[in-house]
């Protein structure tokens, strides 16, 4: 008798689940010999049910996994990913076209290099971004690894103003309010440090 594969679901390096066809074939064969006299149609129905159940479970697990920041290509404060192709990520809540910025790319690249396990957290999102693509959306995101925050680092280095990190009064964060309030305090403290050291955008303003 053939031996079953080790797992019907295998985890990849990034934690996603892959379905192995061999395991489904084995389970189908096991179901077929479980009770003699079952029809081929019943076996196919069982296979279809198992396939649907396993794929649904895999989809739920994948959806709950945060997006690694390494899967996003960052250009200044905007980012795009082949994993979430309909989403335009942004490291600014607003003012992304008008607010003063400086040295963004260098700070983003340097921070990500020292934080290889950073993940993307959506704070608020909306769309469509493009009228021709109704599923497109833009998301204000945090990039974090543990207690370290790329957003706060950008403020601390004077790359942008702290106001760009705060939601408008009518916007409701998709993260817990206690986390959002803690973030606001963190970027406010980071801005005070940037101003004190006349970093980035504050260098010219304080002359």
Image (cartoon, rainbow, N blue to C red):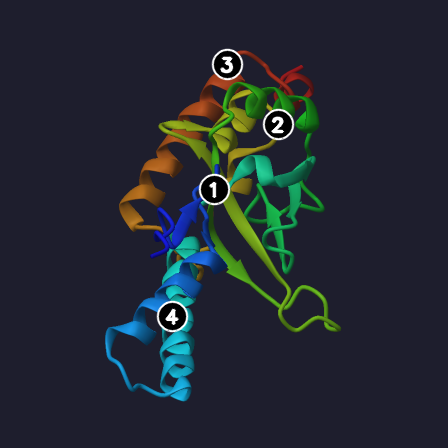
Query: How many C-alpha atoms fall within 10 Å of the one at disc 2: few (<14), some, or many (≥20)?
Result: many
Decide which of tag 2 and tag 4 comes sooner along the chain. Answer: 4
Residue under the point 62% across and 41% down: 72
Residue underneath mark 3: 196
Residue underneath mark 2: 108
Give the Cα separation between the discs numbered 2 and 4. Answer: 50 Å
Q: Which of marks 3 and 4 is in front?
A: 4
Decide which of tag 4 and tag 1 comes sooner along the chain. Answer: 1
Residue 81 lies, in percent from the top left, at 64, 47
Residue 76 lies, in percent from the top left, at 69, 35
Q: Nearer the viewer, mark 2 or mark 4?
A: 4
Residue underneath mark 4: 28
Q: Quick one: SS at disc 1?
A: loop
Query: How many C-alpha atoms fall within 10 Å of the one at disc 3: few (<14), some, or many (≥20)?
Result: few
Decide which of tag 2 and tag 3 comes sooner along the chain. Answer: 2
**Dot label at residue 12:** 1
Residue that lies at the very extreme toward the right in this rendered image: 132
Residue that lies at the very extreme toward the top in this rendered image: 197
Say left or right for 22 vs 175. Answer: right
Give the Cα separation between the discs numbered 2 and 3. Answer: 22 Å
Name the residue nearer the viewer: 134 or 156: 134
Is the Cβ of the residue at disc 2 closer than 8 Å to that at disc 4?
Answer: no
Decide which of tag 1 and tag 2 comes sooner along the chain. Answer: 1
Give the Cα separation between the discs numbered 1 and 3. Answer: 45 Å
Decide which of tag 1 and tag 3 comes sooner along the chain. Answer: 1
């Amino acid at each position: 008798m053939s031996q079953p594969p080790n797992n019907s679901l295998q985890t990849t390096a990034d934690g996603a689940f892959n379905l192995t066809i061999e395991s489904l074939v084995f389970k189908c064969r096991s179901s077929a010999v479980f009770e003699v006299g079952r029809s081929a149609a019943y076996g196919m129905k069982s296979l279809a049910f198992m396939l649907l159940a396993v794929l649904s479970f895999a989809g739920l697990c994948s959806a709950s996994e945060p997006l690694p920041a390494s899967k996003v290509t960052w250009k200044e404060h905007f980012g795009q990913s082949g994993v979430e192709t309909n989403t335009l990520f942004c490291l600014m809540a607003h003012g992304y076209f008008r607010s003063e910025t400086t040295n963004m790319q260098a700070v983003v690249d340097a921070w990500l290099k020292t934080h290889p396990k950073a993940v993307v957290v959506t704070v608020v999102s909306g769309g469509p971004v493009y009228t021709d693509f109704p599923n497109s959306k833009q998301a204000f995101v945090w990039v974090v690894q543990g207690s370290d925050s790329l957003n706060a680092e950008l403020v601390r280095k004077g790359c942008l103003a702290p106001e760009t990190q705060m939601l408008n009064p009518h916007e409701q964060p998709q993260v817990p309010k206690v986390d959002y309030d803690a973030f606001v305090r963190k970027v406010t403290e980071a801005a005070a440090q940037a101003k004190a050291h006349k970093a980035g955008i504050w260098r010219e303003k304080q002359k």
